[in-house]
Amino acid sequence: MKLIARRKDEQQETTKVRVGDVIIGGSELVVIAGPCAIESYEQLLSTALEVQRLGATMLRGGAYKPRTSPYSFRGKREIGLETISQVKALTGLPVVTEVMDARDIEQVAKVADMFQIGSRNMQNYTLLTEVGKTKLPVFLKRGLASTLEEWIYAAEYIMAEGNDQVVLCERGIRTFETYTRNTVDITAIPALKELTHLPVFLDPSHGTGKWSLVSPVALAGVAAGADGLMIEVHPQPDLALSDGDQSLNFKNFAELMERIEPVAKAVGRALA
């Protein structure tokens, strides 16, 4: 862990990752919000405008979606990328979107401000190496059953190619528990702060799989020292083509944003 390890011999600051005009890893807590999958221009635009109004400073939305079943909705792909471009032009929000294949990097980079490497691709070393060769920041999610060491080494693959703009995101791991989609490892947040100098995010949407649990777990992540949150938001979660059960509607997202502020303040952070 030559590049990612926090130096013990001095007080090393957390690396600042710049995504458009947004700084991740500073004193401000960054909230990324938006739908799991881009379904239409209207859906993405309405969500972007609302989460921006409520305080989110970055937009998420998947054009390419890895799904367990090949028969599930797997994204709008090229049409989704065009939708991202249009919505970004109107709102000015920096966008993070998933890249699944090294062959798509150039195309995704034309519209995205940040690559997301999803859980299933955390150890896709070819993909990690290729995004490492770019100048675009990388949002690296933890693998389904990965140890912290394995996750950290995945980040090393990116940084070894010269790209130090990496953010780690805890999104829950697979355990014997079946009530929640995954088991959120809150311990990973302070642990990664000790082990590395990279910013750390929490995704309580994938971490829990239940919209009712997203807010309390999000607040726990802020209290534990997360540099930001990634929250799935949809205009009508009951009609979502992907991950509706874990998506907040606009009302629930507004309530979460109100609750975040005092928790962030208590640990010395302010909302971006």
Image: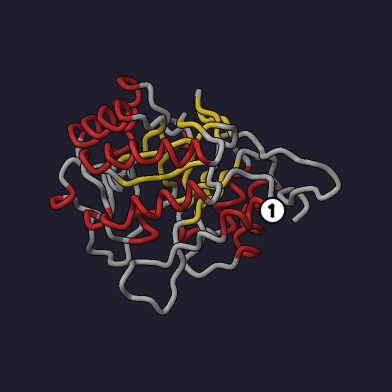
The three-letter code of the residue at mark 1 reads Glu
Look at mark 1 in the image and give the residue it sits on.
194
Extreme residue toward the right, this view: 9
* Residue located 22% across and 54% down the image: 244
Q: Nearer the viewer, residue 269 or 71?
A: 269
Among the 4 quarters of the image, the one containing residue 91 = top left
* Residue located 47% across and 46% down the image: 116
Image position of 135 with respect to 98: above or below = above
Q: Nearer the viewer, residue 20 or 215?
A: 215
What percent of the width, then of the height, locates residue 80? 29, 39
What percent of the width, then of the height, locates residue 113? 47, 32
Q: Nearer the viewer, residue 67 or 9?
A: 9
Among the 4 quarters of the image, the one containing residue 33 = top left
* Residue located 19% across and 36% down the image: 43
Q: Which color scheme is applied?
A: secondary structure
* Residue located 21% across and 33% down the image: 41
Figure label count: 1
Q: Nearer the viewer, residue 87 or 124?
A: 87
Query: Secondary structure beneath disc 1?
Result: helix
Q: With 121 as the anchor, is 197 left or right in this view?
A: right
Image position of 268 with respect to 177: above or below = above
Extreme residue toward the bottom, this view: 176
Q: With 4 as the anchor, is 47 left or right in this view?
A: left
What percent of the width, then of the height, locates residue 47? 24, 34
What percent of the width, then of the height, locates residue 167? 56, 44
